[in-house]
Amino acid sequence: MLQVNNISFSYQKTEILKNISFSVKAGEQLSIIGESGSGKSTLLKLLYGEFDLNSGRLFWRDTEILGPKYNLVVGYDFMKYVAQEFDLMPFTSVAENIGAFLSNFYPEEKQERIKELLEVVELTAFAKVKVKTLSGGQKQRVALARALAKEPEIMLLDEPFSHIDNFKKQSLRRNVFKYLKLKNIACVVATHDKEDVLGFADRMLILNNHEVEEEGAPEDLFENPKTPLIASFFGEFNVIDNKIIYAHQLEVVEDSSLKVRVKQTYFKGHYYLIGADLNGELVFFEHKKPLDVDTEVCLVIN
Ligand SMILES: Nc1ncnc2c1ncn2[C@@H]1O[C@H](COP(=O)(O)OP(=O)(O)OP(=O)(O)O)[C@@H](O)[C@H]1O
């Protein structure tokens, strides 16, 4: 179990993270979300032992994770960290990069393992290609496979699919998260992307104003978002009578006291997002057809 006990940290004078506490069990997937600059990457780096804490303590099982002041070599065998900038060997092949940390003592097992990981990140066809010729997204996939190679007990992933195109993203996410569960590898993912969270994370933690704003299962936070920041992560929302109402909770009906005038219509695939004026405020709702500007419609909250 990863145990984060009341940690605080600052690069210079201003505190970036204040009194952060949480835990992650073996095999559990935790997503860290928060606005840009809220300290997600910094938190992952602290978990990896890259910096010394101002206060608080960090443990994986019984081992205390220590910063460079107390630990000459950053990092631990039980932990792998995939940063936003990948640390690969550009002049060797994809397969060699993935196998770089695997022992040569059992060559057949090593080749088997590389083959398995190439499949997880869908790079089998690129096994022999030199990493320097790959695209950013392909490099990110090599970095993921390389981190998985030695089956760490815990993975720290910083925006793990950010460079990968939408065609590949869905299946790659499923492969990687499924693999982590299968091998019971705990995982902490810093992300902006709700698709990295929904359907995969067991729990999520929201960083705001240097602190943990909320922590819980994605379903619970989605159903009962306590703040606009949390709601905004899940989708378009409104504040009506001081309550957070998602766009999909508003439905057009024949008659109601909630009358709005349509201002904008956006095609969203299987629905349209409509922006409308409600007593001078812009509200958003979903509708299966586009609506003409200035049409008056009535809404109910479901
Ligand atoms: N090496 C550094 N030295 C000084 N300040 C830093 C350093 N790295 C990050 N910061 C500052 O710490 C704060 C948190 O940055 P961090 O990169 O952790 O945020 P983030 O939530 O991961 O952002 P993003 O989502 O944009 O990646 C920011 O104000 C940033 O400017």
Image (cartoon, rainbow, N blue to C red):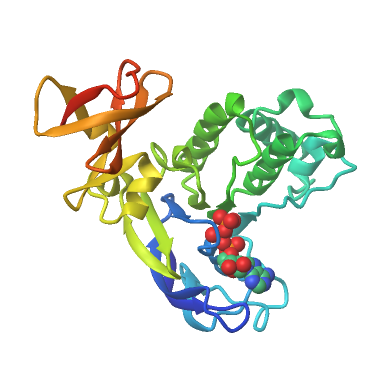
At 63% from the left and 75% from the top, the residue drawn is 51
Q: In which quarter of the image is residue 236?
A: top left
Tell me where residue 160 appears, x and y as whole percent.
Answer: 59, 45
Residue 59 drawn at (x, y percent): 48, 71
User: Could you tell me which residue is drawn at 71 percent across and 35 percent down?
Assistant: 114
State whether residue 301 appears in this view.
Answer: no
Farthest residue, direction left? 256
**Residue in front for this viewpoint, 202 or 159:** 159
The image quadrant where one finds the C terminus is top left
Q: In which quarter of the image is residue 265?
A: top left
Q: Quadrant where the N terminus lies?
A: bottom left
Residue at the image position 42 percent from the left and 64 percent from the top: 208
Instruction: Give coordinates of residue 136: x percent, y percent.
Output: 74, 39
| Residue at x 43% of width, y 62% of height | 207
> Considering only vertical position in the picture, is 79 above or below 193?
below
Residue 17 seen by the camera: yes
Left or right? Give the position of 40 relative to 221: right
- On screen, residue 122 versus residue 292, left or right, reads right
Quadrant of the displayed image that contains ligand 1: bottom right
Q: Is residue 35 above or below residue 130?
A: below
Query: Relative to the observer, which residue lies in front, 178 or 237?
Result: 237
Residue lying at the far top in this picture: please name it: 289
